[in-house]
Amino acid sequence: MTLALIPIVLGLVVNLATSTFEVKAAWWPPLVWTIVVLLTAVSVLSQVTAARSTPPDRQVVLDNVVADLRATIKRQWHDEAVRVLGLERDPMPVRWNLVAQPGFTANPDDMASTAGLNQIGITGETVWSGSGDRIGDVVARFRALDRPRLVVLGGPGAGKTTLAIQLLRELLNGPQADEPVPVLLTLTGWDRAEHPHFGDWLAARLEQRYSSLPAAGPGTALALFRTGRIMPILDGLDEVHAELLPDVLNAINDALEASTRIVVTCRTPEYLQAIAVGQSIADAALLSAQPLSAAVTADYLERILARTIRHPGWNQVLDHLRGETPSALTEVVASPLGLWLTSTTYVTPGTDPGPLLGFAAPAALRSHLLDRLVPALIAARSPAQPDDTDLFRPRRVYEASDVTRWLAFLARILAREPSTERGIGRASVGKRDLAWWELAAAVTTGYPPGWRVTVAMTIASITWGLVIGGLVLGFGPWTALVGGIGLFLGYREGPGHRDHGTWLSHSPARADLRLGGGRTGLLLRKVLLDLAIWVVVLAVVGAVSGVVGYFSNEGALSHVLGAVLLLGPALVLVAMVNAVVAWAESPVAAAGASTPLTTWRADKTLNLFRIVLGGALGAICGGSMLSLADQPVAVVVVGTALTTGAGLVYGVVSGRHHAWLVFATAQR
């Protein structure tokens, strides 16, 4: 890159000394020397930073990344487990049975039919039975397995996800030597067409959630998995479409080495269905959830009731549960989900639990509890104060009807089966992973950036051409107009605007404005690369202008100079915006795991930074050239305002991440 700058610097200096091409303007020598000094400084700094950058040992880098990742995940799940799930305060005594070497039996005559799935049975000795409120015992049994691979089975609401979180936290709190870092991910949304191999999908999900991984270098997340430094805990295997489930299991097994540790949660029927066609997690033990006894649920509720003002009606409810008389209530609370619904909606001061005994059908009681859930949760969590940093606390009081309507909307667009309806914008996303940057596709009928952005870019480019061409260089309006259109086309088709499709596919990013750790050299390289590309573009435009001037008898050199002065500053503006934005969009090692709110804020900051940067560079380029052209103050002010607006538009369009802009537009 330095060699590319040498002829530019020498050409400017020699021309200034010999006046081979004379420019009779007071601002020309200062402009030339400013460019020469800047190019020389950029060249020297680039060489210095390149000489200082020595690649660190890869193993040391991976070890440091593992330590940081372990600390990050530990903080992340402590917050969610304590503040949201209440696992430390109220762990449920769910019974789990462990079969270390499971087998499966079925009637061969029934295997061809769906009904035959009911005949599949799990065989093998139950080597341990324990309670979920003693998670240390579960982890000890997991570590003692000959090959630590575990499939957690149970029905809907049996506590599979909760157990996965408990396992992860216990493994993090007391790690053994050389034990991999457990990471919890959901299997929904795995696009086999995009990521046919499990390791590639796992790496992509980890890099999306933990931005310190891509910051450590490309391929870091995949290297951690392949070297056994990461233990996947995969939640929701049953969320995978039934026809894809065997293929997904096969892909997971293909990625597992002999020493790979893994935990997978799945509903029992779906896992047995995969087994019926010959697929399961290879060499994995089974941990199966058992229904809660009514007496155990009574003890659990009484322990929670001891912390609040107990309604007298609870005596009858608890006596009913301890009597273990079959009823709708005993069936509902036999699952951890039903027990949680009961405690959340009725264990509040002054609430009469009598209605719990008034339902004959379990389905009716579940519907009743779900109807009460949203109002109960709103009442239980007061809005955060202005100085409160709790991300899980609401910022204001919400109406239950509004929350119910919003949740119904989310359920509709996150439907498992993609919808063809367009009443909510486009079809539903067909998966149950909630990504805020994908919501815009479900509510908008357009395809951002759309025609409005194209019109804004056209106006901004023509404005630049008229201001610089007309006010600074004294060109006629048609020449300035053509120059502006050329600038628009060059930017639209140039290297900084490779996304000619839709912004709906953009994912969020964050702005990393640090200059240390080799990032100064990275910034200089990006600036030099974009400048070099645009120098070539400008040279071609100048040559074409020279040919036009030669054949029109208006002077080739004057046309070349005019093209350079008209388009040069604008192309520098575009190159600087592109380079700085590309540099700022580089991954940054975050202090914590990515959450929907943190990624939304980070992408908002990046977009606003990009817009402000474009406006600032537009103001600097336009204002300086207008001032050097010795224009009146009023003209300088108005012209600078116009070039600032053009720069703001360029800032909006630049970059590869517009998720926040699309989301904010879709909210309107």
Image (tube, rainbow, N blue to C red):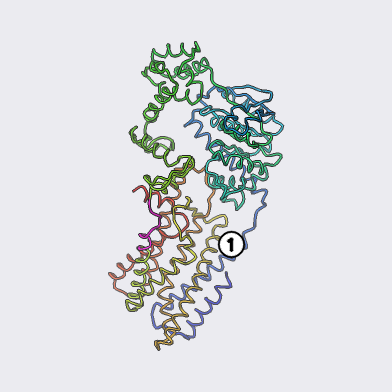
Q: In this rendering, is residue 400 above or below 465?
A: above
- The boundaries of the magenta stretch are 445-455
Task: Decide which of 5, 237 is in the foreground and name it.
Answer: 237
Q: In this rendering, is residue 324 above or below 154?
A: above
Which image quarter: residue 234?
top right
| Residue positioned 42% across, 82% down in the render | 559
**x and y percentages locating residue 175 in the rendered image:** 64, 34
**x and y percentages locating residue 524 in the rendered image:** 53, 63
**x and y percentages locating residue 537 in the rendered image:** 49, 73
Q: In this rendering, is residue 64 above or below 633?
A: above
Q: Quadrant of the N terminus?
A: bottom right
Count of labels shown? 1
Looking at this view, name the residue that lies furthest to the left.
634
Q: Secondary structure at mark 1?
A: helix
Query: Residue type at mark 1?
Result: Thr
Looking at this view, name the residue that lies furthest to the bottom.
553
**x and y percentages locating residue 183 in the rendered image:** 58, 39
Circle 1 crowding by C-alpha within 10 Å: few under 14, some 14–19, many from 20:
some
| Residue positioned 42% across, 73% down in the render | 567
Looking at this view, name the residue that lies furthest to the front.
109
Which image quarter: residue 177?
top right
Query: Would you say residue 454 sits in the magenta stretch?
Result: yes
Please indicate, yes or no, whether residue 401 appears anywhere in the rendered image.
yes
Please indicate, yes or no, whether residue 235 appears anywhere in the rendered image.
no
Query: Would you say residue 499 sits in the magenta stretch?
Result: no
- List the residue tagged with mark 1: 49
Task: Decide which of 233, 348 is in the foreground and name it.
Answer: 233
Task: Decide which of 27, 240 is in the foreground and name it.
Answer: 240
